[in-house]
Amino acid sequence: MMKPLAIAGVVLIGLGIAGLALGRFSYTTEKAVIDVGPIKATVDERHSIAIPDIAGIAAILAGGLLVFLSRRSVA
């Protein structure tokens, strides 16, 4: 059974790799343009968020450190 610290480390490593591989992610929101009585018009707006490479690298290093620390035996 994995320790919670090791699980957190593996999750951080996975997120760091995903951040480096994808580089950015986007999502869509719906914005009401006209809302007059029964007449409604909406526009879909697409937003993109860039993930800095340093954030992915930092997540991988922090995850590796957590996995390493979880493997040390506590005496």
Image (tube, grey):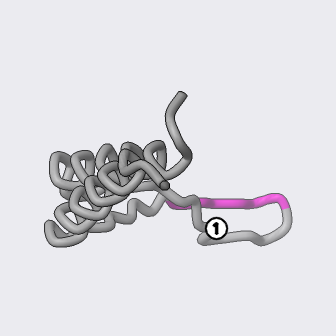
Instruction: Name the quadrant of the N terminus.
Output: top right
- For residue 61, what is the image quadrant? bottom left
In x, y percent, where is residue 73? 42, 48
- Please, which residue is most extreme toward the right here? 37
Three-letter amino acid code at the position of disc 1: Ala
Task: State whether residue 65 appears in this view.
Answer: yes
Q: Secondary structure at mark 1?
A: strand
Magenta range is 38-43
Find out whether residue 70 is within the magenta segment: no
Q: Is residue 67 left or right of residue 40?
A: left
Q: Residue 21: horizontal and vertical position, in percent?
A: 16, 46
- The residue indicated by pointer 1 is 32
- Residue 19 rendering spot, x and y as whole percentages: 25, 54
Residue found at x 48% / y 54%:
74
What residue lies at 17% left-to-right and 54% top-to-bottom? 20
Q: Quadrant of residue 62?
A: bottom left
